[in-house]
Amino acid sequence: MFAKLKNLSPKKKALIGVSFLSLISLIYLYSATQNKKPSSLPTPLPETEIPTFSQEGLQQTQNDFEFGQIVKKEVEKLPFLTSLPIITNNYVVLYDFEKRLIRVDLSASVTQIQVEEEIKTKLTQIGVDLKKIPLRFSPALSGE
């Protein structure tokens, strides 16, 4: 058989070579597609029960809602609350809801005299009326 191939013209040899390569390529492509697993659709998630809430959980949700309503009313009356606390290395400025005043907790490294004007300026800038809302300074606690 190989002796007959030697006697063929170069054009026929090329044609046989290309045909052979084409046949090999087709066999390869066919086998590659047969080995692939068909793509499966994702499986649906199992059905879950709708969570039930304990009486305590329901009560907490109600309490959270009511607290949110109270905070909303306070912010409407005192819009500067959204700008508090003011925290620096020397002091922390908070609003005390129970006493209805602004409290300044000082660090051990400063005195009221050193920071009072700075704090009053910052509070005025965020809309605090210092004539209507008292300002109380608290010295640093021991151990700070």
Image (tube, helix red, strand yellow):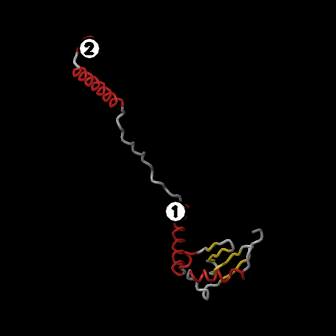
Whole-percent x, y for residue 78 in the image: 55, 80
Mark 2 Cα-neighbour bin, 10 Å: few <14, some 14–19, many ≥20: few
Answer with the quarter of the image where residue 118 lies. Answer: bottom right
Q: Name the residue that disc number 2 marks.
A: 6
State the CA–CA distance, disc 2 to disc 1: 93 Å
Against 12, residue 70 (above or below) is below
Name which residue type carries label 2: Lys
Quick one: 69 or 130, which is closer to the camera? 130
Q: List the single residue furthest toward the bottom.
A: 131
Name which residue type carries label 1: Leu
Q: Name the residue that disc number 1 marks.
A: 58
Numbered disc total: 2
Quick one: 24 or 137, which is closer to the camera? 24
Under circle 1, the secondary element is: helix
Residue pictured at 66% horizontal, 78% vertical: 103
Quick one: 2 or 55, which is closer to the camera? 2
Mark 1 Cα-neighbour bin, 10 Å: few <14, some 14–19, many ≥20: few
Whole-percent x, y for residue 12 in the image: 22, 20
Q: List the single residue furthest toward the right.
A: 142
Answer with the quarter of the image where residue 17 lies. Answer: top left
Residue pictured at 61% horizontal, 85% vertical: 133
The C terminus lies in quadrant: bottom right
Whole-percent x, y for residue 88 in the image: 65, 72
Whole-percent x, y for residue 107 in the image: 72, 73
Left or right: where 32 falls relative to 5: right
The N terminus lies in quadrant: top left
For marks 2 and 1, give the one nearer the viewer: 2
Against 93, residue 31 (above or below) is above
**Among the two numbered marks 2 and 1 on one chain, the one whose residue lies closer to the N terminus:** 2
Quick one: 77 or 83, which is closer to the camera? 83
